[in-house]
Amino acid sequence: MSNKGKVIVFGGIGQLGQCISKLTTARNIQDFVFLDEIAGNILDLEVLRSVFTSESPEFVVNCAAYTAVDKAEDEPELCEKINSTGAGNLAMLCAEFKATLIHISTDFVFEGDIPGLLKETDPAVPINVYGKTKLQGELEIAKHLEAHYILRTSWLYSEFAGNFAKTMLKLGAERDELSIIVDQVGTPTYGVDLAAVILNVIASANKAYGTYHYSNEGLCSWYDFAKAIFEISATELRVYPIPTSAYPTKARRPAFSVMDKTKIKTTFNLEIPYWRDSLVKCIHAIK
């Protein structure tokens, strides 16, 4: 790593935090500090100031977020506090302590009603509370801090924490059949791949600040994703495709949210793995 200073990871024991921790351990990278939601409470400026004062980070990675998409419809104030106010707090402290912020955002900032690759410059029109608060968080960061990278990602899964891949494996072991939505299309993103990109951005010393899209390559529906999980894990069960209308949820989801990754690939010279190849690695890690 080229960075001389410390890196603080907020939301450090969540899914992505654990993926980053896995890589820093495997690569013997020191100087990463992983904070849980108490030690790294992004809503408490006093706590944040003492963390920044004691660690004086060069980089801050914000993996802390309210991500329960349906529950957010019932808890919009809490969701907004964490995803918008919290992100703004980190940006203000980064500005004050001259640290660079890497913030994780989502494909849910888009309406997802057009079947085309979404660019960073496309209008963000979120259709649920979670997406709205994540977009507000992006705007808060941009308002307070120039030295930031916002990485929008999609359909995050890994061997850590709760996620679609692990839920499918659990259900696959318990049931003979499942019905999965076929008319929402996006790209699964393996958390360890995203973690590698974060380490790459830190090591690059490239100050091309701004918003970037990152997911694995390719696209699929939730049905295709589930089918692949069962095939790769050799799980025997019947999977039926159903439309979104057959499985109503509190929050609306984008129908098509496949992101264009040209900008991040060219800026940081990345080769991005195909989603299914990464899924094989993840299932191997889970097994």
Image (spheres, helix red, strand yellow):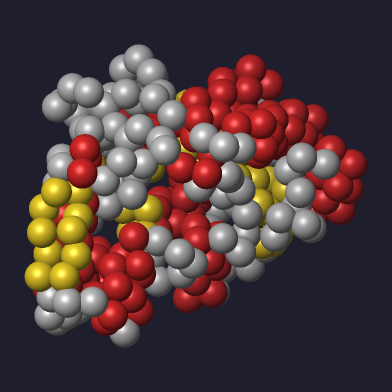
Q: Residue 95 at x, y = what percent?
A: 73, 29
Name the image quarter holding residue 162. bottom left
Residue at 57% across, 44% down:
66
- Outermost residue on the bottom side: it is 287
Q: Residue 112 at x, y = what percent?
A: 26, 27
Circle count = 0
71 or 133: nearer the viewer: 71
Residue 257 seen in render = yes
Residue at 15% across, 42% down:
243
131 or 94: nearer the viewer: 131
Residue at 40% across, 61% down:
163
39 or 235: nearer the viewer: 235
252 or 277: nearer the viewer: 252
Q: Is residue 24 above or below residue 119?
A: below
Q: Is 281 left, or right, of 44 in this rendering?
A: left
Q: Is residue 208 above or below residue 166?
A: above
Name the image quarter holding residue 108. top left
Q: Is residue 196 above or below residue 66?
A: below
Quarter of the figure with the C terminus: bottom left
Residue 196 seen in render = no
Q: Is 283 left, or right, of 65 in this rendering?
A: left
Residue at 41% across, 36% down:
251
Q: Is 29 left, or right, of 117 in this rendering?
A: right
Q: Residue 65 at x, y = what percent?
A: 58, 45
Q: Is 160 left, or right, of 89 in this rendering?
A: left
Q: Residue 224 at x, y = what percent?
A: 13, 55
